Image: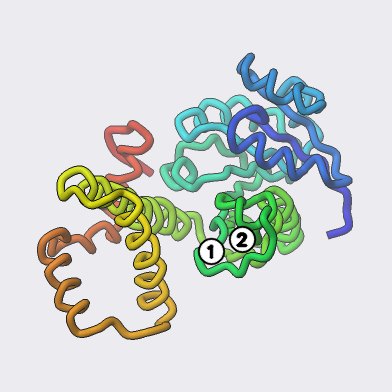
Amino acid sequence: MSDKLTIAVIGAGGKMGMRVSNNLVKTDHTVYYSENSPAGQERVTATGRTLTDTDAAVADADVVVLAVPDLALAAVSAAVIPQMKSGSIMLTLDPAAAYAGLLATREDVIQGVTHPCHPSVFLERHTPEEYADTFGGIAAPQDAIAAIESDDPAKKEILEAVVRIIFAPVIDVHWVTVKQLAQLEPTLVETVACMVGALLAEALEETVNTMGVPREAARSILLGHTQVALANTLKGSNPFSDACLIAMDYGRESIIKEDWKKIFRDDELDKNLARMLHLDEITR
C-alpha cells in the first residue's frame, strides 16, 4: 500500500509497544507514540522517539494500535475511542478482550484484531539474525493472523498494511473472525502448544533431578527428538517405529485425560478466557 497513514501506538513503551514501534519507525508513515508509565516513557525516549499525549496521538490517526495488557484494554479503549476520527481503525494485538466484548465500541470506528504467528519451527533460516529471532518481528519471517469487523476492502487493505509493518517481515496474513482468532489463541497455541512446551521443560528437570541423567545428555536427546516428533507428526516426514508408537500410547494413557478435546468447545473457551481476564464469566 502506497498511501501514507497516520498511526498511533498506545502503550508504546511496553514489550509489544516497543516491538511494533521499532518497525513502524522504519516507515514513511506518520507515527505518534503514547505511553503513561514513567518506565515506559523512558524506554521510548531512549530510542529517540518523541512522546505524544494520547488524545493528540489518536485524534487524526487512521489506525490506533492498543499495545497494552489485556486487563487494561477495557479502560484504555473507553478512554481512546471518543477521541478517534470517524472511519478509523482501533487495532488490538490479542483477541481475548475483543471476543469477550470488553472493548469500547463506536458505530463509526472499526475494530480490528491481529496476532503474530511467530517464526515457524520449520522455517528455513539463513543468517545469524534470523536464527536469533525466535519471537519474530526483527529478522525471521513469520505469518500473522488478523480479523476486522468491516466489509470495506479498503479498510482491510489498510489493516493488512499495518499488520505487515508491525510484525515484519511477514510472509502471509491469514484472515479469520474474532472468535476464530480466540480459538487459535489461546486454545490451540497457549492451552495446548505452550503447555506442551512447559511440560517438556518439566520432564527434562525430572529426568535430570529425579533419574540422575546428565543434563547435557538429556537436553540433547530431548531437543533432537522434539524436532523429529514435530516433523513426523506435522509434516509427515518419517513414520514412527512400532516400539515408539507403543511408548506414545503409554504416554497418552498416563498423561492425557480422555476428555481433553473439550477445550475446543465454546463454553470451555469462555471459561478459559474468563480466567485469563480475571472475570467471573464471559457475557456478551
Residue 154 appears in the picture as rendered? yes
* SS assignment at label 2: strand
Q: How many marks?
A: 2
Mark 1: few, some, or many residues within 10 Å (few <14, many ≥20)?
Answer: some
Which residue is pictured at 27% across the width and 59% down the height? 265
- Residue 163 lies, in percent from the top left, at 68, 53
Q: Could you tell me which quadrant the C terminus lies in?
A: top left
Q: Which residue is mark 1?
A: 120
Query: Does any portion of residue 114 appear in the rendered image?
Result: no
Query: How many residues crowd around disc 2 within 10 Å: few (fewer than 14), some, or many (20 or more)?
Result: many
Question: Mark 1 is on which residue type?
Answer: Ser
Q: Secondary structure at mark 1?
A: loop
Res. 48 image quadrant: top right
Q: Alpha-carbon distance for marks 2 and 1?
A: 7 Å
Q: Is residue 87 left or right of residue 91?
A: right
Quarter of the figure with the N terminus: bottom right
Q: Residue at x 77, y 43 (%)?
A: 24
- Position of 183 with respect to 16 (left or right) is left
Q: Earlier in the sequence, mark 2 or mark 1?
A: 1
Q: Is residue 195 left or right of residue 134?
A: left
Location of residue 123 with respect to 146 vertically, above or below = below
Quarter of image, res 158: bottom right
**Residue 128, numbered circle:** none
Amino acid marked by disc 2: Gln
| Residue identifier under label 2 | 142
**Snapshot quadrant of residue 9:** top right
Give x and y (percent) for residue 79: 61, 25
Residue at 20 percent across and 47 percent down: it is 206
- Which residue is nearer to you in this view: 198 or 207? 207
* Residue 187 image offset from top left, x and y in percent: 36, 55
